[in-house]
Amino acid sequence: MSRVRTALVLAALLSFALLAGCGADPAFTSGKVYLADMNYQRAIEQLHLAIRNSPKAWEPHMYLGQAYGDLAGATAGEPLNIQVMKDGVTQKMEITPGQTDVLLPLVHEEFQKALELAVEQAAKDKVENAITQYWLVYHKKGEQYVEAQKFEEAVPEFERAIVIDARKPDAYINLGYSLHMSGNEDRAIEVFEQALSQGAENPTLKENLVSVYQAKAGALASSGDYPNALRYFEKIQKVSADTPDINYNIGLMYYQMKEYREALKYFRDQLTLAGDDEEVIYRVFLAHWAIATGFDNEAQTAPSEDMKTSAMQSAQEEYAAALEPLLKLIEINNEEVTYHRALARVYNKLGRNDEAMEELREVEALLKGGELGGTPAPAPAPTPAAAPAEAPAVPPSGTTGQ
């Protein structure tokens, strides 16, 4: 019955075209009719014929893309031998309805050809609407899985949406988010970076990318892999230079790698941007102290008096440089025992013994006074200033891809 109805409708359309003097290609007309009747094999055959008849026409490519798309979305049916274009040659391929991995690249290819051939803006808009329609089919499925907390099931749906149209950033954002929530941090980063490299200027995309970078950098820093943690903090700075504490975190990684000069640059940048911060200022002191100690060690093993004198002079310069941050810290918090004790050590290294004794008396007074409970405060722990996020920002819901 279905074939009889299709034949009647096709005959009617062909008669109308002839009576109206329309120059429409019968293959194109019949291809649309077969598509409407879900006879995908015949529709694809006729649309391929229409493309051969009119290689510069955009509409046959658009409808062929829709035919592949509808076949990809079909949930049941017998295997079909359909025509596909490969290396410029039409070939037969056996396809099972719903075989998305094979069909969706064909959908994308035909839609792109239609866009290339469409000249009028109205024609381009029609193709773009068709692309969005099929993109939404898979994107909405992915969103439904995300809402149900089924992140692993959401991943392939967003991947299919990207195959149809790789220009829409929402699919990348949601795919990266789903991968992250599935525990696949590295793949999430790849997805976000790919979208960014394609010029997708989207605040949510950047926010999520920064979040997964922070999570990765934090995990690497916690495991002691400071060089790779540094690499991810530097990526954060490149994507979003105004991320809070990014200069401090980069400086901290250099500090942990014993590259103290480089660390100082970032600590000072952090202070310039964010103002006085005790932890950062204390790190400036520690970096100068570490450099000075290194020169002291060089002096002890120097092979000549000249080299020894040079190393000792450099050490004194670094101890002198360490005074500034300590004095600033005491100005901010005069009751911190750690700062006074450190200042006494610096004065002692500089040969300023009276001032060193004065600071030690200050330490004794503070401890006796009990302001700190009789226990000196420890040095700040070498952990990133900004705690790694547990997950990127929640992806957009109800998106249209526009």
Image: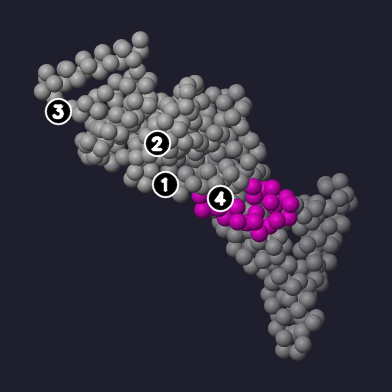
Q: Earlier in the sequence, mark 4 or mark 1?
A: 1
Identify the magenta region.
Answer: 216-243
* Most foreground residue, 139 or 257: 139
At 64% from the left and 50% from the top, the residue drawn is 217
Label 3 – label 2 distance at C-alpha: 29 Å
Query: Secondary structure beneath disc 1?
Result: loop
- Label 3 and label 1: CA atoms lie apart by 42 Å
Alpha carbon of mark 1 to alpha carbon of mark 2: how far? Answer: 37 Å
Where is mark 3, residue-wise?
23
Label 4, label 1: how many angstroms apart (C-alpha)?
Answer: 17 Å
Tell me the kind of residue under disc 4: Ile
227 part of magenta stretch: yes
Disc 1 target residue: 199
Q: Is residue 340 left or right of residue 329?
A: right
* 1 vs 2, front mark: 2
Q: Mark 4 points at which residue?
A: 236
Q: How far apart are marks 2 and 4 (CA)?
A: 49 Å
Q: Which of 237 and 314 is in front in this view?
A: 237
In this picture, residue 264 sits left or right of residue 350: left
Within 10 angstroms of label 2, few (less than 14), some, or many (20 or more) residues? few
Question: At label 2, which amino acid type do we have?
Answer: Lys
